[in-house]
Every structure is written in structure tokens, then in C-alpha cells.
Image (spheres, rainbow, N blue to C red):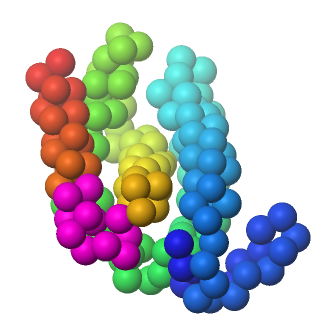
Amino acid sequence: MKLQGNITINGRSYRAGHEIRWYTVYPFFLAHMLMFGGSGFVMAYGEQHPGVAFLYMHGGIAIFVYTIFYLNIFGRDKVKWMFINAALGLLGIYTQIGWILSLFHKNIGDYPLRVHVIPFLYFVLYTFLLRQAVLDITRSRENAARRRHVERGYATLLTVGYLVSYVL
């Protein structure tokens, strides 16, 4: 993967345009975001939860930092489209979060909209990272035909997942 900005990883500096291997980035971010996103989810929807201000500070700072990393790793255009696609996909996210909450015998409608902001943003960041990982792991980013095939499969799987969670 080609970096879009300057970044330091494990004390080593990489300049924009430098090629790095996918496993330099994805395992760390996937695990790290799962932990922070999971804690944000539990704080937002748990029986004992902090106030919304703390939820926004805890999640907001992390989301801001992740977005800065994304800009440096993936570039402004990809991050812009991440947020555009997220805005278009709010219904899908709503059904996914609703389904996850139903596993804990909770209803998404029982929470005010302001509580959903941080879990929704984590969902956007995480699914963006998963898509980027799939493109790099399958070596599809620079191969237009393969990328179209992988992106269609990815979109199909997500759509099926959204439909299944909506029905459930």
C-alpha cells in the first residue's frame, strides 16, 4: 500500500508515497479500533453508562486521531468518500447496530440519537478499514479488474448482512 502522508510506525518514519506492507497497518488498527469501538459501544449501551459528554470525549478524541491516521495512510479523497458513503449508509448502520443490540435484549429506539453518534462513527471507521484491508490483502488495489470483483463481493456481503440483520 502506498502512503498518502507522512507517518511514523514503531519509531521508523515513512514519507508520503512510500510503499508499506498491509500487515504493517491493519492488524494494529483492526485490534485497536475493535477495543476502543467496543468500549465505546459498551459505554453507550451498557446498563451503567457515563454521561454523553464523557462518551463524546472518549470516543471523539479517538475518532479524531484515527481520522488523522486515515488521511495520512489512505489520502483525503478516500476519507472524503468514507464519510459520504457513511452518510448514505446510515440506514444500514442503524440496522446493524440495532441487530447487535438485540443480541443483548436491547432496542436501538430506546436510546436518544445523541448516544448513537460515537458507536455509528466507530462502525464507519471500522468498516472502512475492513474494506481497505480486503483490497490490500487480496492485492486488488492496483489491479482494476480484480478490485471491481473484490469490491462487488464486499458490497454484496455487506448488503446481505444488512438485510439479514434488518430481518432479524
Identity of the residue furthest to the top in this view: 105
Q: Is residue 54 visible?
A: no
Residue 118 horizontal/vertical position (percent) = 48, 48
- Residue found 63% across the figure and 84% down from its top: 18
Residue 101 horizontal/vertical position (percent) = 36, 23
- Residue found 39% across the figure and 42% down from its top: 116
Q: In the rendered view, does 92 fall on the left or right side of 10?
A: left
Residue 69 horizontal/vertical position (percent) = 61, 70
- Circle count: 0
Residue range corresponding to the magenta coloring: 140-151
Looking at this view, is 8 or 121 the one in front? 8
Looking at this view, is 47 or 155 the one in front? 155
- Residue found 42% across the figure and 63% down from its top: 139
Q: In the rendered view, does 163 fall on the left or right side of 45?
A: left
In the rendered image, which quarter is residue 77 located in? Answer: bottom left
- Reply yes or no: does residue 141 show up in magenta: yes
- Reply yes or no: does residue 85 show up in magenta: no
In the rendered image, which quarter is residue 95 located in? Answer: top left
Q: Does the magenta stretch mainly form a helix, a strand or a loop?
A: helix
Q: Quadrant of the C terminus?
A: top left
- Residue found 29% across the figure and 59% down from its top: 86
Q: Is residue 152 visible?
A: yes
Residue 27 horizontal/vertical position (percent) = 62, 48
Q: In the rendered view, does 14 fall on the left or right side of 107?
A: right
Position of residue 142 relative to residue 63, above or below, is: below
